[in-house]
Image (cartoon, grey):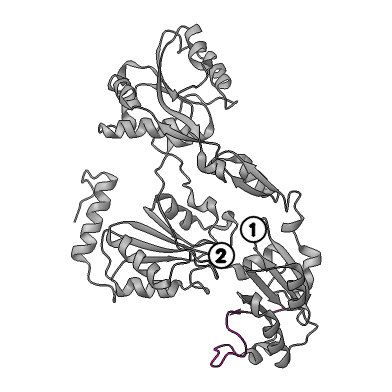
Amino acid sequence: MASADDDFTAPDAAAWLDEYVADELPELGSHQVRPGGMVYLVGAGPGDPGLLTVRARELLDRCDAVVYDALAHPALLERGDSTQAPPELHFVGKRGGDERSARQDDINALLVRLAREGKRVVRLKGGDPFVFGRGSEEAQALAEAEVAFEVVPGVTSGIAAPAYAGIPVTHRGLATSVTFVTGHEAPDKTGSQTNWAALAQSGGTLVLYMGVKRLAAIAAALEAGGLPGEIPAAAIQWGTHARQRTVTATLATLADEVRRAGLSAPVITVIGWSVLLRDEIAWFDRRPLFGRTVVVTRPEHGSEMARRLRELGATVLTVPATRMEPLDPEPLHEALAELEAYEWVLFTSQHAVRLVWEALRATGRDARALAHARVAAIGKGTADALLRHGIAVDVLPERFVAEGLLEALQERHDVAGTRVLYATAEGARDVLPDGLDEMGALVDVVHIYRSVPNAEGAER
């Protein structure tokens, strides 16, 4: 065992713990805990990226690979920390009628292979992996292959979609129970596991997953079982997405209304008296920008504008107009070789933070290499990226532009006569170096990357 005063770094401690677990702990049931690869069966929630759990976000930000379905929101696939390299992305479809959908056996094999390669794999599944998500089948396959896994529940669409439509699935005096059922099976199917007659007598709210194509047959089966045809019902397409659409009717008329409105999967259907509350408490589709689509030409991460637009109800397409392309790293390595000679280091983007940090680590150094220098960042996103590497900035302007940073530096008395390292993009404006030169500072400008047109973004 390691003692409390062992001089372990965090990676050393983690490696020691993995080795100890593998060598010393007995098998836990049929699931042997071992170092190396790991699969996380993660619920992505119903669509709104804001409904992702904290644990899911944590895993997505540090995994090596993501295996995701067609309904995963694109924002979930971006790192929360833009300075980290992106994970491997494996699209497996899993939506009815999508020719790109992988077979379940192939998905299971992919998860096992990636884990055996030593990767930390997030299997990102819509909603909750164990609610009509076949997550348990994937867990069985991983257990059989003796691959370590963890299950991370997600917000299921059967609760979230009605809530976003202003329909509570339970309500005092209207519905004291709720039943979730797949509508994937036809009611007249021989050997069906669903007892529609019993459901008709359950007395609570019924929530159907994946039943839009069989809605007329399901309604007929429920009516035949004694459920009144006049009971309120609603169909919610793309629940929690900005393109959500809701159709309300009765059990007897809902199928016709859905067909008339042109709704298609994914749809959640709610049958019960609490549907009546939609007229009173609907909120999501009454926001000021609901139904509008806005293109934001910035990356998803750190985009305050994209976040605010979504809060106002808009569908936001984040289509970065440019992408970062690293330049020859040799000039940066030469500057960092004499880092002790600089009294100031300026960062004007998260890209610069990532490239400088990678160059430091390549030579075995870390945040301590900047201990002697004062550090300035152009904005909060850049400052946060530095802080994640243990570097707290000395100067952060009120205005997050070059002019704002220059003004903040001009207010200080420890800039004139100093040597400044300014690692920036090729083609960046000369506002900072020219202004610092006028203040009497000696500025070394090192171009470490360039912004180039994003062809993929332009195609989108």
Image: 146 above or below 84: below
Work out how far the residue at label 2 is from the one at label 1, CA to CA, in angstroms: 14 Å
Q: What element does badge 1 sit on?
A: loop
Asked whether residue 405 is drawn in magenta, I would say: no
Q: Where's the N terminus, which quadrant?
A: bottom left
- Seen from the viewer's position, the closer of residues 183 and 408 is 183
Counting from the top left corner in percent of width and height, residue 438 is at: 50, 7
Q: What element does badge 2 sit on?
A: loop
Image: 296 above or below 221: above
Q: Earlier in the sequence, mark 2 or mark 1?
A: 2
Residue at 64% across / 58% down in the picture? 241
- Seen from the viewer's position, the closer of residues 82 and 151 is 82
- Seen from the viewer's position, the closer of residues 49 and 152 is 49
Taking the image as shown, residue 7 lies to the left or right of residue 416, namely: left
Q: Quadrant of residue 280?
A: bottom right
Q: Amino acid at mark 2?
A: Val
- Seen from the viewer's position, the closer of residues 191 and 358 is 191
Image: 184 above or below 340: below
Image: 409 above or below 72: above
Counting from the top left corner in percent of width and height, residue 430 is at: 51, 16
Q: Which residue is mark 2?
A: 155
Magenta stretch, main secondary structure class: loop
Range of magenta residues: 175-194
Q: Amino acid at mark 1?
A: His
Q: Which residue is mark 1?
A: 241
Taking the image as shown, residue 180 lies to the left or right of residue 90, namely: right
Closer to us: mark 2 or mark 1?
1
Residue at 30% across / 24% down in the picture? 330
Asked whether residue 182 is drawn in magenta, I would say: yes
**Disc 1 residue crowd, few under 14, some 14–19, many 20+, Cα 10 Å:** many
Q: Quadrant of residue 253?
A: bottom right
